[in-house]
């Protein structure tokens, strides 16, 4: 095992002068800034003052981390955690930022996330006498865990995968019964706890030790050059005023499409008002405050998707998403995601609805872009809402075949607490705010986006196929929501009832 070498590396690391600096970020004024690329254009330039004394960060980490956990010797335990691999190469035609690069790092390499994770993990290993064994697959880690659990094998201590892949809770140890794990500590996402619990039991969690759930959070990118050309005004002010609505978005986006090569065909090589994909009709629905699930008094899900609100939001969402003169949809285009990525990079896409991780792809982009929330249904709506990709996101669980769940729980708790002032700060303040974000206003917008994320347990589980209802209608170019709902309601209700019965038996 690597333990002896890691301890030596840890001692050397402590003597290094390089220290993680968390720059203080200030909210912007009311005006729209011009923005700009990071000073040297490199992916590791934070754009922040790095002369601050490291002692403050270290003391804060010590207080939040060590002083709130008991002393523990794990006896050299190997902590086996399986997750999705990250492609660290950069290719403007492909997504590269939707893997789990936050789990472990083999060595220091000068990049912000890698080095923060390396230092965090080596410190944890030395303090609690265990070692990380990170197993990464190119796809479907949960499928491997499922095979292991069904075979009754104790092969993994923890699994990290997309929330959609993690939805069969019968594969996991109930987190409420795990010693050393406090899901209600501030380092764990309480919105996930309340939304994805079932029968007042928790089986998966999201917390500060993960960044992929942030990367998989949906937002709207806009090209500042094109927005200025079309005289759209300050979109940040529109958001702040509560006037960034689906109608406002549609009106603006329609200005962005044109046959720029003059061949009489609107295709992948032309300019587009809206770069999108089929999945994004769900994002618009959640942004408009439509919901699949509510919870009853016993914390069990109740189907509540077909109502007047949903019908009204769907009418607008379908109008936008089915407009082929407006949308370059990667589901329709010749080269899929590559066409949208390329169009935005080449100033041929005005708006792009996508994940935060895709915004990270554009740290190399010459033209300025901004980030704003998903539009509201109307101005009367209370907040801006968004959700995550079910696939390019992350949650963590403990396979129920684990023979040391309390020790695993302690490691997860320690790692999550240690991440609050290290990994989380690095991701927000240096990677997002210092490298990706090009103006003060987009920082304010990120706060709005992350504050109102929706985790819908029925949508994520897709019981009876009900979670696909909007994408099915879009792909078939049908706006017959009522008919589609009627065809799936019975199977959805049956599947939900069976799921509740199964989890009641588990409890």
Image (tube, rainbow, N blue to C red):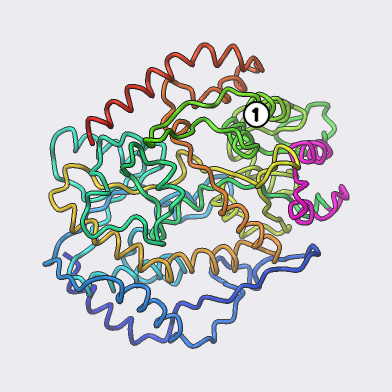
- The residue lying at 72 percent from left, 30 percent from top is 320
Whether residue 240 is in magenta: the answer is: yes
Figure quadrant of residue 225: bottom right
Left or right of 250 in this view: 330 = left
Residue under pointer 1: 309
Q: Is residue 328 above or below residue 59?
A: above
Left or right of 190 in this view: 7 = left
Which quarter of the figure is the N terminus placed in?
bottom left
Q: Position of residue 136 (x, y in %)?
A: 31, 50
Magenta stretch in the rendered image: 228-257
Which sits in the foreground, 124 or 39? 124
Figure quadrant of residue 5: bottom left
Q: Is residue 370 above or below residue 218?
A: below
Majority SS type along the magenta span: helix
* SS of the residue under disc 1: helix
Which quarter of the figure is the C terminus placed in?
top left
**Farthest-out residue, front:** 297
Q: Position of residue 357 (x, y in %)?
A: 54, 51
Please count the marks in the image: 1
Which sits in the foreground, 56 or 379? 379
Q: Is residue 438 above or below residue 487?
A: below
Which sits in the foreground, 282 or 263? 282
Q: Position of residue 267 (x, y in %)?
A: 73, 30
- The residue lying at 50 percent from left, 53 percent from top is 214
Q: Is residue 209 above or below residue 458?
A: below
Q: Position of residue 76 (x, y in %)?
A: 13, 66
Label 1: how many residues lie within 10 Å, few (<14), some (14-19) or many (20+)? some
Whether residue 395 is in magenta: the answer is: no
């Amino acid at each position: 095992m690597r333990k002896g070498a890691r301890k030596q590396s840890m001692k050397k690391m402590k003597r290094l002068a390089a220290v993680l600096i968390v720059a203080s970020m200030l909210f912007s004024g009311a005006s729209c800034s011009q923005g700009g690329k990071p000073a040297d254009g490199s992916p590791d330039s934070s754009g922040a003052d790095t002369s601050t004394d490291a002692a403050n960060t270290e003391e804060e980490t010590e207080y939040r981390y060590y002083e709130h956990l008991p002393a523990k010797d794990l006896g050299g335990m190997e902590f086996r955690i399986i997750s999705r691999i990250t492609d660290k190469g950069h290719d403007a035609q492909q997504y590269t930022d939707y893997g789990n690069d936050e789990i472990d790092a083999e060595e220091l390499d000068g990049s912000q996330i890698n080095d923060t994770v390396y230092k965090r993990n080596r410190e944890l290993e030395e303090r609690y006498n265990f070692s990380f064994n990170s197993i990464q697959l190119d796809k479907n880690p949960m499928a491997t865990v499922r095979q292991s659990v069904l075979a009754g094998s104790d092969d993994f201590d923890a699994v990290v995968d997309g929330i959609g892949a993690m939805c069969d809770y019968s594969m996991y140890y109930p987190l409420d019964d795990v010693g050393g794990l406090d899901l209600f500590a501030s380092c764990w996402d309480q919105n996930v706890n309340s939304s994805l619990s079932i029968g007042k039991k928790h089986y998966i969690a999201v917390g500060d030790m993960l960044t992929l759930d942030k990367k998989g959070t949906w937002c709207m990118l806009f090209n500042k050059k094109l927005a200025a050309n079309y005289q759209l005004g300050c979109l940040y002010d529109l958001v702040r005023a509560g006037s960034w609505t689906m109608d406002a978005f549609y009106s603006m986006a329609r200005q962005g499409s044109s046959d720029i090569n003059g061949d009489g065909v609107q295709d992948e090589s032309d300019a587009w008002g809206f770069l999108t994909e089929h999945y994004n009709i769900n994002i618009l629905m959640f942004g408009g405050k439509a919901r699949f699930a509510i919870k009853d008094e016993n914390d069990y899900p109740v189907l509540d998707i077909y109502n007047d609100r949903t019908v009204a939001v769907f009418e607008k969402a379908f109008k936008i998403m089915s407009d082929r003169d407006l949308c370059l949809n990667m589901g329709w285009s010749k080269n899929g995601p590559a066409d949208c990525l390329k169009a935005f990079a080449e100033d041929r896409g005005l708006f792009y609805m996508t994940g935060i991780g895709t915004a990270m792809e554009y740290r190399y982009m010459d033209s300025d872009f901004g980030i704003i929330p998903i539009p509201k249904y109307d101005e009367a709506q209370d907040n801006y809402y968004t959700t995550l990709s079910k696939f390019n996101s992350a949650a963590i669980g403990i396979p129920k075949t684990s023979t040391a769940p309390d020790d695993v729980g302690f490691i997860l708790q320690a790692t999550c607490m240690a991440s609050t002032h290290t990994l989380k700060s690095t991701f927000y303040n240096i990677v997002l705010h210092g490298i990706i974000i090009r103006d003060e206003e987009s920082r304010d917008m990120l706060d709005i986006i992350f504050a109102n994320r929706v985790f819908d347990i029925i949508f994520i589980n897709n019981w009876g196929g009900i979670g696909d209802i909007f994408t099915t209608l879009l792909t078939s170019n049908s706006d017959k929501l009522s008919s589609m709902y009627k065809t799936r309601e019975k199977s959805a209700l049956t599947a939900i009832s069976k799921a509740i019965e199964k989890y009641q038996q588990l409890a």
